[in-house]
Amino acid sequence: MTAPLKQPTWRKPAGMLAILLIILVWSIIVVSASDFIGAQHIAVQSVIYLVAGVIWIAPMRPLMIWMETGSFRAPPKT
């Protein structure tokens, strides 16, 4: 027997909007620093853009947990 489907909560669309907002804000920050980054050596630019391309993912885990559970912390493992 399968479990009944849960009703979607408001956290899912709110979380999706928060993800889009985080991406938008982060891209504005990086683009606003493009003059400074463009003046650097190509190797330094590569490192900056690599870090900038990965660091925005950090707030995603707690946000995804919140979207699923309603809490920003992962539930304890049983």
Image (cartoon, helix red, strand yellow):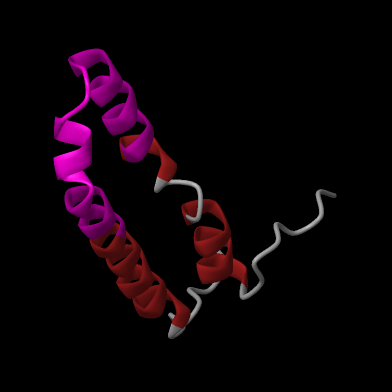
- Is 32 on the left-hand or right-hand side of 67? left
Q: Main secondary structure of the magenta part?
A: helix
The residue at 28%/58% (across/down) is 23
- Is 65 on the left-hand or right-hand side of 25? right
- Indicate the position of residue 65 as horizontal and vertical percent values: 58, 61
- Is 29 on the left-hand or right-hand side of 1? left
- Is 56 on the left-hand or right-hand side of 35? right
Bounds of the magenta segment = 26-52
The residue at 43%/46% (across/down) is 57
Identify the residue at the far top of this view.
Answer: 43
Taking 46 as reference, is 58 above or below it? below
From the viewer's side, name the closer residue of 72 and 23. 23
Taking 2 as reference, is 54 above or below it? above
The residue at 25%/48% (across/down) is 30
- Indicate the position of residue 18 as horizontal and vertical percent values: 37, 71
Quarter of the picture holding the N terminus? bottom right
- Indicate the position of residue 48 as horizontal and vertical percent values: 32, 30
Magenta region includes residue 41:
yes
The residue at 46%/79% (across/down) is 11
From the viewer's side, name the closer residue of 76 and 57. 57
